[in-house]
């Protein structure tokens, strides 16, 4: 990258472009340069990084981008978030919601879940990732501890999908079911299956998951105010 000074608008445009194509080193350089130039972490996040990831999601929906492009862009953004996260915490930037997420017991697949995490973080959510092979009691304990708005269950195998129901039953038994929005997802999961197990939301991919989560959150908050 040239050492010449660049304007704020040019820096933000470049940051957007490099995030879109998943150029991690350039994204890191521009993030650091933006901070050095006095730009706030929120400016970099909301005027370049998040719009880029939203565009990645839109291109994925249209079939112009595929999973590898989403992963590469997500990884580039994750690098920038490593730098920005502590700074955002210092400024007291409001998160739009909190999500506890994990891959269900018996399942060790996490690529999809990790991509969902990045998309949620990028959209302004606080993400608590419980990892893989997460037993129902671990989800219950995390909901009790963190009091999230949403709990997300991920499954990649048809054989582990019944854990959705086991997890929801465990939340109900602990008296927590009505306190959280339950979202499910993963390669073999369908809207029909989500409905059968009693989940509140389902999304076919990471970008759709964020959109759905925001809708569910808005509906819940509106109902609480009513």
Image (cartoon, rainbow, N blue to C red):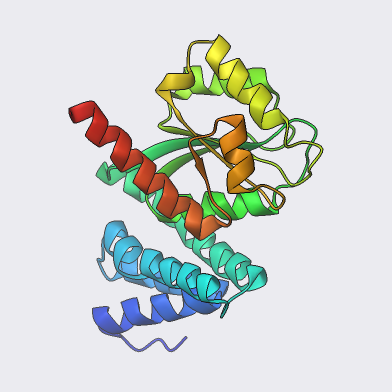
Quarter of the image for the C terminus: give it: top left
Q: Residue at x 26, y 66 (%)?
A: 39
Q: Nearer the viewer, residue 94 or 205?
A: 205
Q: Nearer the viewer, residue 197 or 94?
A: 197
Q: Say if residue 121 shows up in the picture.
A: no
Q: Is residue 10 above or below residue 186?
A: below
Q: Residue at x 41, y 21 (%)?
A: 179
Q: Is residue 35 above or below residue 171?
A: below
Q: Say if residue 33 shows up in the picture.
A: yes
Query: Residue 125: where, in percent of width, then height?
Result: 40, 45
Query: Residue 95: where, in percent of width, then height?
Result: 33, 43
Q: Nearer the viewer, residue 192 or 152?
A: 192
Q: Is residue 14 above or below residue 165?
A: below
Q: Nearer the viewer, residue 110 or 157?
A: 157
Seen from this angle, which residue lies furthest left?
Answer: 226
Query: Residue 148: where, in percent of width, then height?
Result: 43, 29
How many marks can you see? 0
In terms of image quadrants, where is residue 171? top right
Q: Is residue 197 left or right of residue 13?
A: right
Query: Residue 34: where, in percent of width, then height?
Result: 33, 70
In terms of image quadrants, where is residue 93? top left
Q: Is residue 28 above or below residue 213?
A: below
Q: Residue at x 43, y 89 (%)?
A: 2
Q: Is residue 34 left or right of residue 150?
A: left
């Amino acid at each position: 990258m040239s050492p010449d000074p660049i304007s704020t608008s040019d820096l933000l445009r470049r940051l957007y472009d490099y995030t879109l194509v998943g150029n991690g080193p350039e994204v890191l350089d521009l993030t650091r340069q933006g901070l050095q130039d006095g730009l706030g972490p929120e400016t970099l996040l909301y005027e370049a990084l998040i719009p880029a990831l939203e565009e990645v999601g839109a291109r994925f929906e249209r079939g112009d981008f595929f999973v590898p492009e989403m992963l590469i862009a997500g990884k580039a953004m994750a690098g920038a978030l490593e730098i920005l996260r502590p700074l955002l915490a210092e400024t007291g930037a409001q998160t739009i919601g909190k999500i506890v997420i994990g891959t269900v017991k018996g399942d060790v697949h996490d690529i999809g879940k990790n991509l969902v995490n990045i998309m949620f973080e990028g959209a302004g959510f606080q993400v608590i990732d419980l990892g893989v092979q997460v037993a129902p009691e671990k989800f219950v304990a995390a909901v009790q501890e963190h009091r999230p708005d949403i709990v997300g269950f991920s499954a990649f195998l048809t054989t582990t999908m019944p854990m959705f129901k086991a997890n929801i039953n465990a939340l109900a038994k602990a008296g927590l079911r009505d306190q959280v929005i339950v979202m499910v997802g993963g390669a073999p999961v369908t809207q029909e299956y989500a409905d059968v197990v009693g989940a509140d939301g389902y999304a076919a991919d990471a970008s759709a998951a964020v959109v759905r989560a925001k809708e569910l959150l808005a509906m819940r908050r509106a109902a609480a105010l009513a």
